[in-house]
Amino acid sequence: MTDLLEVNGVTKRFGGLTAVKNASFTLKKGEFTGILGPNGAGKTTLFNILTGFMQPTTGTIHFNGELVRELAPYKVVNRGMARTFQLTRPFVGMNLLENVLVACMSPRASEDKDKEARASYLLAQVGLGGRDKEPVETLPYGDLRRLEIARALATRPDLLLLDEPFAGLGSSEIEQLAQLIRRLHREENLTILLIEHKLREFMALVSRVIAMNFGEIIAVGPPEEIVKNEKVIEAYIGKTEEAHASA
Amino acid sequence: MTRTNIALLVLIACVATLPLFGDAYALRLGTMACMYAIFALSWNIVGGFAGYPSFATAAFFGLGAYTTGILMNKGVPLPLSLLGSLVLCLLLAAALGAVLLRLRGHYFAIASLSLVEVFRELVNNATDLTGGGMGLNIPLVSGSSVLSDATFFFYAMWGLLLITAIVVIAVSMSKLGFGLNCIRQNETASNMVGLNSTLYKAIAFGLSACFVGAAGGLYAAWVHYIDPSDVFDILYSVKPIVMALMGGLGSPLGVVCGAFVYLGLEEVVWRNYIQIHSGVLGVLIILLLLFLPHGLVSLHAGKIWRGLTGRKAKHV
């Protein structure tokens, strides 16, 4: 498998605060990787850097062999990297079909001759079939998440970045969405990079974990290794009493 | 094509019949009405479709007026001078838009407003070319009489309004209009689905400026004399926004209705309350906006009937 994404020494400083510190990792085509970490670990900042919403202070990002560090967000999307947001961002005043149609206008989707049919197909793919003309304002939160994924898929990405897709969802909604993400990875042969801090759902989905804390990558490996990693346990639970006593 | 767009074209077609009924005064009002409608429609591209509150209308109106005036003084015929104004405003606005439209909200509003002052100062100081504060005389393009002159400029401005309306309707139905709508809704999300929002906004700003520039050129030829304080009047930037709000933001039909109603109010108030016309006009506009927050376009026959009778309108 070839490297799809290569992140080298990426650092992001906001004045005196270092939000991301010397992050380096690679993603291979077809991989399902997750970025794990507590709130404030720098996960979303890293996503924003990858997708062009922020420029890193130092470091390089190569996507499909091309340097994408200086590119504007729309250019990053048009190179094949799509994302969803922690807070859903639908186009209010439009129906579901129109929300996905916007993304079908991107250059990567130019091969889609019948854009409406493609948008309708994607809505069906994410479990919103037959609801094309429904106004987006009426959608429950879980369905908004699905809509965001459909919109991201419409740009025909090679890499899909999902920013906390389970945030604010109930357990049944989480299970349904997890199944959808799993199916998309399998059937569409998508490379997925997922941010989440809900451990159970996260570990059941991904095949590789990048663990972060205070802006640093503290561990990389398969889920079964990461759950036993002391640094990761410490980041989530804090030091044990024995550790405190010996310190 | 939507019903409101057809209604807009029908309304503009009806305006064309004015010379059949009106005298020179009515034609002057008609020409002003067409000019205001061009302002409102043009502003609606960047303000209504893209949601960027531009105060640059006066800048491009003045620039268009001076471009036409200078070209006509150099012997260029009126149609070519107007085309020159249109192209210059289009290109300059698109270039400036690519920079200014990186700002948002109040910041963009202030930056666009500053363009008016910048252009005015440039014109004021380029005395060899523009006449500076002394103004610029423009050769007559007139016919044989006052009425034929008024008719010519009415139809010229009406023709420009028709072209503007067709372009605005085309934009609203195109990929550009769809993209601008998305940018108004959520610019971050628009970027994240691959829309080049800077390009879309620059095109919108260019289109909103070019017809205003051409209207400025026609105005200059019509009045035969222009000076910086006249054509770079800040009110030309404020009026289109008021017209759009009165008529219905984002609706081409609404903003044209808003322009016509605004001119009507302005004329009636000016005629009857000349000493306090600005205050009276302001109060009337505030009342209109209070009672019709979504503009005149939100009025339906049923609503008017219910308002007058207090009963529910029957559907037939």
Image: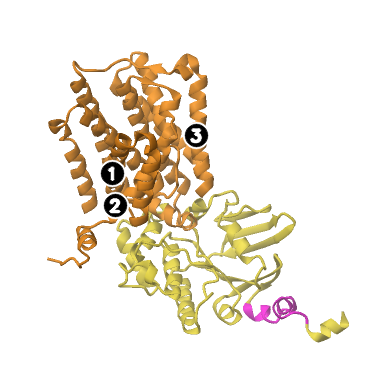
Chain colours: A yellow, B orange
Query: Looking at the image, do the residues carrying marks 2 and 3 touch, with CB atoms under 8 Å apart?
Result: no
Q: Is residue A34 magenta?
A: no
Q: Give whichever of A93, A6 is nearer the camera.
A: A93
- Mark 3 or 1, which is nearer the eye? 1
Amino acid type at mark 3: Leu
- Mark 2 or 3, which is nearer the eye? 2
- Pick the quarter of the image with the C terminus of chain B: bottom left
The residue at which mark 1 appears reads as: B261
How many labels were placed on the picture? Answer: 3
Q: Is residue B66 at least partly visible in the picture?
A: yes
Q: Give whichever of A152, A144 is nearer the camera.
A: A144
- Give percent across and percent down for residue B187: 47, 54
Height in image: A196 above or below A75?
below
Magenta stretch, residue numbers: A223-239
Height in image: A173 above or below A195?
below
- Give percent across and percent down for residue B30: 24, 33
Query: Looking at the image, do the residues carrying marks 3 and 1 touch, with CB atoms under 8 Å apart?
Result: no
Amino acid type at mark 2: Leu
Mark drawn on residue B296: 2
Question: Does residue B220 appear to the left or right of B151 in the view shown?
Answer: right
Q: Quote the CA–CA distance across marks 2 and 3.
A: 30 Å
Same chain for marks 2 and 1? yes
Residue extending furthest bottom? A242
**Secondary structure found at label 2:** helix
The residue at which mark 3 appears reads as: B115
Question: Does residue A244 appear to the left or right of B121 in the view shown?
Answer: right
- Work out whether mark 2 precedes mark 3 in sequence or the reverse, and give the earlier one: 3
